[in-house]
Amino acid sequence: MKRKHATRSRSSALLEQPATVWRHSQRNRVIEDAWLTDVSVGLKVGFDRETHSTTSLFGPRNKLVRSPQAETILGLISALNAKDPYTARHSIRVESYARCIAKRLKLGPEITKMIRIAALLHDIGKIGIADSILTKKGPLTETEFETMKEHPALGASILGPIHFMDPLLPLVVHHHEWFDGNGYPAGLSADAIPFGAKVIQAADCVDAMMWPRSYRTGFPISKIITEFEEGSGSQFDPNIARITIEWLHEYSAIMESQLAKGAGYD
Ligand SMILES: [Fe+2]
Ligand SMILES: [Fe+2]
């Protein structure tokens, strides 16, 4: 109960923050290419080692991963992996999809970095969701889904004490908003949704549809493209949906091949 109360007060302030308030402050210029590269290297090492160990995503400390920011992100992903390996691997895939979409949107390096880090951590709040719901073998009940919908605000609560995460919080909080306002947690629509959150939402949906769950098979890429065509303007920002569809067409053969091998696309 105590945790829920703290989460509500924290999230209520974030939910009232319009996308236009999001600014890249001087303090956040510590987010630089070098340590984001460290994160990528750490993830690559972890992903490769995953085939040898299911208990740790990263294995022994890699000497290339040394900046505090990179270690913070890798530590958070590792914590998520300890809680639910599926969600950790999903987060790594969503980062790679979001990076591809951001590149095709011709976004600048700063916003691209923000999107990549927020994509890695977008579901970190699932650490606070009960295992009986998070790893349930089957569709969630309405009550369980309501609990699951707390994960964006829980994510902001987890990342909130880490100052360099400040500009990422709106992207984490709003990654389940819909363009038409029918998403959650705030029901924001169109340009009120942080742009980066809309990119992550598209990447998140690609992965959610593509990968099989215990209760359903993964969608073929052709069906994912159809979902984006039909969801453009309702679930998805039309411009981001168009770019995502272009990217899915371009890389469908590569992605199908990676999927067949059981690996994420990169
Ligand atoms: Fe999510
Ligand atoms: Fe997700």
Image (tube, helix red, strand yellow):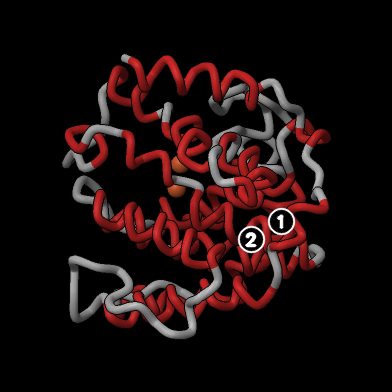
The relative height of residue 166 versus residue 38 in the rendered view (above or below) is above
> At which x and y percent is residue 170?
65, 38
Quarter of the picture holding the N terminus = top left
Dots 2, 1 in contact, CB < 8 A: yes
Residue located at (50% from left, 76% from top): 66
Count the marks. Answer: 2
Which residue is nearer to you in this view: 39 or 258?
39
Q: Which mark is residue 242?
A: 1
As displayed, is residue 214 above or below residue 210? above
**Mark 1 surroundings: few (<14), some (14-19) or many (≥20) residues within 10 A:** some
Q: Is residue 94 visible?
A: yes
Amino acid residing under circle 1: Arg
For disc 2, the neighbor class at 10 Å (few under 14, some 14 to 19, many from 20) is many
| Residue 38, horizontal then vertical, whole percent | 54, 77
Name the residue tied to disc 2.
245
Nearest the viewer among 87 and 189 is 87
View extreme (bottom): residue: 63
Q: Amino acid at mark 2?
A: Ile
Q: Quadrant of residue 33?
A: bottom right
Q: CA distance from mark 2 to mark 1?
A: 5 Å
Picture quadrant where residue 60 is located: bottom left
Compared across the picture, whether 56 is left or right of 222 comes to left
Q: Is residue 254 visible in this depiction of the protein?
A: no
Q: Is mark 2 within 8 Å of ligand 2?
A: no
| Label 2: element kind | helix
Q: Is residue 194 above or below residue 40?
A: above
Residue closer to the observer: 219 or 93:
93
Front residue of 6/195: it is 6
Name which residue lies at 41% across and 51% down. Answer: 208
Residue at the image point whose x is 24% and y is 68% from the top:
56
> Which residue shows up at 73% across the image and 54% down it?
28
